Image (cartoon, rainbow, N blue to C red):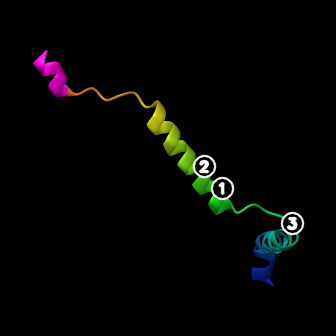
Amino acid sequence: MGIIRSNFLFMMGTVCGVYVAQNYNVPNIKMLANTALVMAKHLEENYRKPKKNKEDDDNH
């Protein structure tokens, strides 16, 4: 009885999560995270400040 009592909230959350995933249109979190990561990389590449070359500074 101790294991059931101590893990009751975890088990109920799992049961509710399975129910929601089976009966509702839940977005794929992994695909959503990948899309966000690609967009963040794209923004970083486009708006990053250009690097200063030390060679250019030495020649002038």
Q: Is residue 45 left or right of residue 4?
A: left
Q: Which residues are magenta?
A: 54-60
Coordinates of residue 31 in the picture (x, y in percent): 64, 60
Q: Position of residue 24 (x, y in %)?
A: 86, 66
Q: Could you tell me how far apart the alpha carbons at marks 3 and 2 are, in whole angstroms?
A: 23 Å
Q: Which residue is mark 2?
A: 36
Q: Earlier in the sequence, mark 3 or mark 1?
A: 3
Residue labelled with disc 3: 24
Q: Which mark is residue 32?
A: 1
Measuring from the top left, give residue 53's x and y in whole percent: 22, 28
Disc 2 crowd, CA 10 A, few/some/many (<14, 14-19, 20+): few
Q: Which amino acid type is marked by label 1?
A: Leu
> Would you say the magenta stretch is mainly helix, strand or loop?
helix
Q: Give the Cα distance between marks 2 and 1.
A: 6 Å
Label 1, secondary structure: give it: helix
As shown in the figure, which amino acid type bears the numbered disc 2? Ala
Q: Is residue 11 left or right of residue 39?
A: right
Magenta span contains residue 33: no
Q: Is residue 44 above or below residue 38?
A: above
59 lies left or right of 13: left
Residue at 83% in and 72% down: 12
